[in-house]
Amino acid sequence: MRTKKAFPPASERIKPIIARLWQRYPGARCALNHSNALELLVATILSAQCTDERVNQVTKSLFRKYRTAEDYANADPERFEQEIRSTGFFRNKTKSILAMARALVERHGGRVPETMEELVKLPGVGRKTANVVLGTAFGKNEGVVVDTHVRRIARRLGLTRHSDPDKIEQDLMGLVPRRQWTRFSHTLIHHGRQICQARKPKCEICPVNDLCPSAGKAG
């Protein structure tokens, strides 16, 4: 019986994977429209279980109306719910955003803090959201954003065997140089939207298909 050829370990493949994906997506960046850290924080909370395109449609008018943490803190909950309704889970998101804004006003003078420790203490803000804000708004690589795209692609590429986002993040942090964490996240997200899609990945045109143990295998 023929034995299956062993695939090179992730540590040997990660460098060419990064190089090829960066060549394919040279301008990969956060897809959530924003002009400051507060807007990015709000948009990221809204993006849970929602497409970035939909969030950008909603925030186009939302950001014109609510410009400071105080504006959100003083917002009428029922009105705010209707303003973000199309993003889904609008009641929970309203509670999170308004409570987050009140915490910013009370604890941080209305400013978004620049540390992981302070950010994750805000209502509605977990590690993934904090990573988005720290990496994109402040240029601080404190971790790797693990959304559905990053989780799926990391597993398909054999960069992790885990399903838990925190464990996946730890694996990726151990493979990818720290200075590249934020860009790596954005790049995988773009790759997930354009080629390595959930239901039908386009393996035949994937720039890293020869480095991927899952190439040609959907799922």
Image (tube, grey):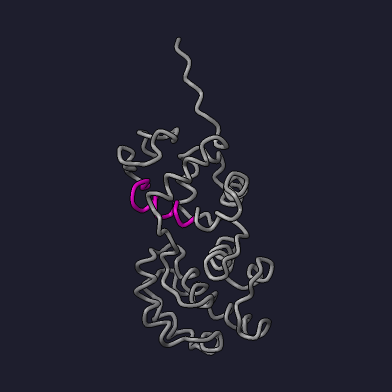
Whether the magenta-drawn stretch holds residue 188 is answered as yes
In terms of image quadrants, where is residue 205? Answer: top left
Residue 63 in the image: above or below residue 186: below
Identify the main secondary structure in magenta: helix
Residue extent of the magenta highlight: 185-198
Report the quarter where the N terminus lies.
top left
Report the quarter where the C terminus lies.
top left
Q: Residue at x 43, y 80 (%)?
A: 81
Q: Which of 60 and 191 is in front in this view?
A: 191
Residue 182 in the image: above or below residue 216: below
Q: Say how many tags the image has.
A: 0
Horizontally, residue 89 falls left or right of residue 109, namely left
Q: Which residue is drawn at 55% across and 74% down?
A: 96
Horizontally, residue 23 falls left or right of residue 124, namely left
Q: Which of 148 and 135 is in front in this view?
A: 135
Image x and y of residue 209, in percent: 38, 36
Horizontally, residue 116 falls left or right of residue 22, namely right
Whether the magenta-drawn stretch holds residue 111 is answered as no
Image x and y of residue 37, in percent: 53, 75
Q: Which residue is drawn at 52% across and 41% down?
A: 15
Q: Which residue is drawn at 45% across and 12% down?
A: 2
Residue 139 in the image: above or below residue 63: above
Image x and y of residue 212, in percent: 44, 35
Image x and y of residue 113, in percent: 64, 75
